[in-house]
Image (cartoon, helix red, strand yellow):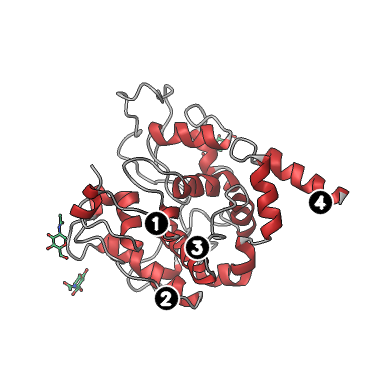
């Protein structure tokens, strides 16, 4: 008893900015965890090349740091039926794989074996500072370029992600590519957090998305394609046969197959309008 309550307390401090103590107790009672359906072997079979010397993120994105980060989001991969839980994790891993891919059409083991190869944007076009945003003002000289598994970008994402996770996203954005647990937490934060008018990716994958009238008109039906719309719809959705969208789908099909779960419908977003 003493040991487990110390462990609980320790976890509590690690994630204190995010979670109430009560939700930890709930998690402990349920005893469902991401690691119970995603073993290290399965993870390694998905990311066959992430630690190749050709990959700039070599040795950065470890299984343990993903599992540790997921503990701060006790509903991730633990909500719904076994198939729903597997499909959510597969979809998350697929989306972060596209964001960090080192794959190409004829790559060894195929293009979808190269997720988590990059940890930060290599040739950013700008510092991704939206200076009109006064709530999350840019700090002089800092770059809010894509970093981490979801390639967190812009001051208006670094600010709130840091606030939720307990780091100074505006003054210390580099931590997202320097600390792999923080890196995975930013991706999970993005996944779990509703940013209106978009639903959270989590709610889409666990059947808790209720389309508004505007969503219905825009064909934004639940499925993997809607996640792509949430993440980068302004650039990728509403376009027939977009190669970036197809790359995301390719990762998802491969991971769903490794999980022995179907992908569900609406993989694409070519018939969807993007959010605002
Ligand atoms: C990691 O942090 C160090 C300082 O601790 C900094 O000099 C370096 O630029 C950072 N690296 C990345 C990739 O952000
Ligand atoms: C919705 O999808 C249908 C095809 O399924 C398409 O004809 C229509 O243009 C789409 N609507 C919007 C707003 O994109
Ligand atoms: C989609 O694009 C790929 C090339 O990126 C092409 O090989 C394929 O034939 C296209 N599919 C359709 C249905 O247009």
* Image quarter hosting the C terminus: top left
| 179 to the left or right of 205 | right
Q: How far apart are marks 4 and 1 (CA)?
A: 34 Å
Q: Distance between the residues labelled 3 and 2?
A: 13 Å
Of marks 4 and 1, which one's residue comes earlier in the chain? Answer: 4
The residue that disc 2 covers is: 262
Of marks 2 and 1, which one's residue comes earlier in the chain? Answer: 1
Residue 233 x %, y %: 27, 51
Q: Distance between the residues labelled 2 and 1?
A: 16 Å
Q: Quadrant of residue 182?
A: top right
Of marks 2 and 4, which one's residue comes earlier in the chain? Answer: 4
The residue that disc 3 covers is: 89
Residue 220 x %, y %: 26, 56
| 211 to the left or right of 41 | left
Residue at the spot 29% in from the left edge and 23% down from the top edge: 132
Of marks 1 and 3, which one's residue comes earlier in the chain? Answer: 3
Q: Residues within 10 Å of mark 3 (few under 14, many from 20)?
A: many
């Amino acid at each position: 008893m003493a040991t487990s309550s110390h462990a609980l307390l320790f976890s509590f401090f690690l994630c204190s900015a995010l979670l109430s103590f009560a939700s930890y107790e709930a998690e402990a009672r349920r005893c469902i965890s991401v690691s119970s359906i995603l073993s290290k072997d399965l993870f390694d079979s998905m990311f066959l090349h992430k630690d190749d010397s050709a990959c700039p993120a070599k040795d950065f994105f470890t299984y343990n740091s993903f599992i540790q980060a997921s503990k701060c989001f006790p509903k991730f991969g633990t909500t719904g039926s076994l198939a729903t839980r597997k499909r959510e994790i597969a979809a998350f891993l697929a989306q972060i794989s596209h964001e960090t891919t080192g794959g190409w059409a004829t790559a060894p083991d195929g293009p979808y074996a190269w997720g988590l190869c990059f940890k930060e944007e290599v040739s950013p076009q700008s510092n991704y500072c939206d200076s009109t945003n006064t709530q999350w003002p840019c700090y002089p000289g800092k770059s809010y370029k894509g970093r981490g598994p979801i390639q967190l970008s812009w001051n208006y994402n670094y600010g709130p992600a840091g606030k939720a996770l307990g780091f100074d996203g505006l003054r210390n954005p580099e931590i997202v590519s320097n600390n792999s647990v923080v890196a995975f937490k930013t991706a999970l934060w993005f996944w779990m957090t509703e940013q209106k008018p978009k639903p959270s990716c989590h709610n889409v994958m666990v059947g808790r998305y209720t389309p508004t009238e505007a969503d219905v008109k825009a064909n934004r039906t639940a499925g993997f394609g809607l996640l792509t719309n949430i993440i980068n719809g302004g650039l990728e959705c509403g376009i027939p046969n977009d190669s970036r969208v197809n790359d995301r789908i390719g990762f998802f099909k491969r991971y769903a197959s490794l999980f022995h779960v179907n992908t569900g419908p609406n993989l694409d977003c070519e018939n969807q309008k993007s959010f605002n």
